[in-house]
Image: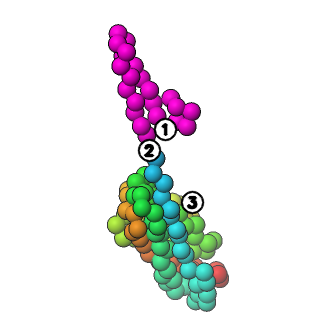
Amino acid sequence: MSPDEKHLYTSGRDDDAVAVFSRSIPSADLEIVKPGSLDPVTVGTNLTYVITITNNSTSNATINVQIKDKLPPGSTLVFAEAIGGSCAGTTDNYVHVQNACCWSQLDSNNRGQSRLRRVQNADQHC
């Protein structure tokens, strides 16, 4: 292994041949934008907002790109969708507490969007 861990050197048992395996790890430049202020929110009504993730690099992001959004107390997730991906919510005592949207790959200079809709319970205020 090279000192920078980018190359693996291996040799055969009975010969002088050396094989060099190079490992290039491209990096992605991901930017996430979420609306800053969603107020006012009327109790008991749906609130829909879009979280946008953009890959600004020239390399594809290929290992499970994820957006996780924690829902505020008193909120219920109505639905979530990811354009070109998938979404799933986690629960705690049957209440959705977090939503995660994933893309298996986000191409270079490309954008993924996650649209979330949540409902405020009647006795809660944001």
Asked if 70 appears above or below 42 in the picture, the reply is: above
Residue bearing mark 3? 92
Label 3 element class: strand
Residue bearing mark 1? 6
Q: Amino acid at mark 2?
A: Ser
Give the CA distance from mark 1 to mark 3.
42 Å
Q: Earlier in the sequence, mark 1 or mark 3?
A: 1
Q: Residue at x 63, y 71 (%)?
A: 73
- Write down the region rendered in magenta: 1-24
* Quadrant holding the C terminus: bottom right
**Residue 111 percent across, percent down from the top left:** 41, 70
Report which quarter residue 36 is drawn in: bottom right
Label pair 1/3, CB-CB below 8 angstroms: no
Q: Nearer the viewer, residue 84 or 20?
A: 20
Q: Amino acid at mark 1?
A: Lys
Q: Residue at x 52, y 86 (%)?
A: 45
Mark 2 or 3: in front is: 2
**Residue 55 percent across, percent down from the top left:** 45, 65
Label 1 element class: loop
Give the CA distance from mark 1 to mark 2.
7 Å
Residue bearing mark 2? 24
Q: Nearer the viewer, residue 18 or 28?
A: 18
Q: Nearer the viewer, residue 48 or 53?
A: 53
Label pair 1/2, CB-CB below 8 angstroms: yes
Tell me if residue 125 is in the magenta stretch: no
Give the CA distance from mark 2 to mark 3.
40 Å
Q: Amino acid at mark 3?
A: Asp
Q: Earlier in the sequence, mark 1 or mark 2?
A: 1
Tell me if residue 18 is in the magenta stretch: yes
